[in-house]
Amino acid sequence: MSYVDEVIAEVIAKNPDEPEFHQAVREVLESIRPVIEANEAQFRRDALLERLVNPERQIKFRVPWLDDNGDVHVNTGYRVQFNSAIGPYKGGLRLHPSVNIGIIKFLGFEQIFKNSLTGLPIGGGKGGSDFDPKGKSDREVMRFCQSFMTELCKYIGADTDVPAGDIGTGGREIGYMFGQYKKIRGLFEGVLTGKGLTYGGSLARTEATGYGLLYITDELLRCHGESMQGKTVVVSGAGNVAIYAIEKAQQLGAKVVTCSDSTGWIYDPDGIDVAALKEIKEVKRARLTEYKNYRPNAEYHEGRGVWQIKADIALPCATQNELHLDDAKQLVANGCKAVCEGANMPTTEDATKYLQDNGVWFIPGKASNAGGVATSALEMSQNSERLSWSFEEVDAQLKKIMENVYHNIDNAAKKYGFEGNYVVGANIAGFEKVLDAMNAQGIV
Ligand code: NDP
């Protein structure tokens, strides 16, 4: 059996009931197979892949908190510090009932290569809890965040591990966590990113993942002689990534006709009203059913369905495995040219293959949503030098980083004979830098 196959089999055997983690490992290791097989004996001797797929550390802890009635609830908290070869661990905190160790490991593993692709000195990590902020009062969310940080603060720091937001963790949650970290550790330092602007946050961090997604999509189109101007776009999700992806797509002259949340989806043939969406999701924290109050001509549907709408470009921005094989077939039948992932691993393996086999340009999330973590790293730089850069400066750096990511993954794919396969390109380009750093640092 080849070394790659052996390690994939071992990951599945040793980490049962973690299908998302298996999926992420399989996708990366299959992509880097040409690099591994070119030097298989040495890599096997160094147990390189075993060191890559086993987190440096995984922390699991109890999070007790009081609701507004004085009743106690207990959730589980996680932080997986996956790989620090190229810098301090960096990656978000997900608060969602579906969170378990397998989800956090898949996200942490992906984060290693994503962070490497940004060109910035950040290692891979991820964390979160099965706590659901939905339907909780502000005070309940605060008490949860404080309890979560009371334990997490023992393991993180501005030079060791710098968490950020993710699903369910926005500015409010980061603020409560930062306050608790400061109180316990007595340190006002850049230990979290996605902070508010009055206490060390970076301009353009809120917009960064969605804007970055559009910068790389735009570069992809430009390199194929096209542009966003006049394109019809379907987006899933209605959270941080989706909102700012829609905003930037429309600024670039495209029309975005869909968005969705965990209960339903909107089709607005006149183009999504971003101001209305922000009010519903960022201010009221309400359901998308409200959208019709702002735009009576729009349609609201229960369940999932955005991929059935005819479009030139599809941007999945909600969650993992939300774009299935049937959706891919529908997109291809409708003439879709590009799928660029805003979420982490939103496209299933068979759907990805179908899109690629049918000539759709497909950019995986670890490249196309890297703008969020890249801007988090820019927030860390600003915190270190105790300065704040202007929106324009951060945005310009973000655009440059995303264009570089595109060319890095494109070049890596070409170098290994997989031209146009951006999945292979992203995994190889991300891996090569980590490999070099791991080799230089010895067996640790
Ligand atoms: P948010 O919590 O702001 O928004 C998530 C959106 O997806 C919401 O509309 C939510 O619906 C919907 N959603 C979440 N879970 C499900 C589900 N199981 N089924 C259907 N819909 C769901 O998260 P973000 O926008 O920050 O993150 C979205 C994706 O992007 C995630 O995969 C995240 O890991 C990834 N990402 C985020 C980055 C960031 O900077 N925020 C950076 C890089 C990647 P509802 O409103 O009903 O909750």
Image (cartoon, helix red, strand yellow):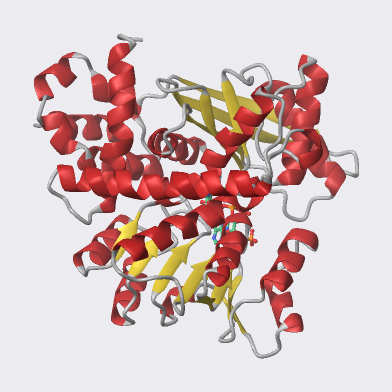
Question: Residue 391: x and y, percent?
Answer: 67, 48
Tell me the residue at 68%/40% (across/down).
Answer: 202
Residue drawn at point x = 22 percent, y = 68 percent: 359
The extreme bottom residue here reads 297
The answer to whether 158 appears left or right of 114 in the picture is right
Q: Quadrant of the C terminus?
A: top left
**Vertical placement of residue 63 versus 203, above or below:** above
Up the image or down, 77 lies above or below 48; here it is below
Residue 272 vs residue 135, the one in the foreground? 272
Residue 78 placement: quadrant = top right
Ligand 1's quadrant is: bottom right
Q: Quadrant of the N terminus?
A: top left
The answer to whether residue 424 is seen in the rendering is no
**Percent x, y of residue 99:** 55, 43
Please provide percent x and percent y for residue 290: 74, 76
**At x 28% / y 21%, what residue is drawn?**
436
- Residue 305: % across, % down: 48, 76
Residue drawn at point x = 38 percent, y = 45 percent: 405
Q: Is residue 437 visible?
A: yes
Residue farthest toward the right in the current orientation of the protein:
69
> Front-most of 292 and 222?
222
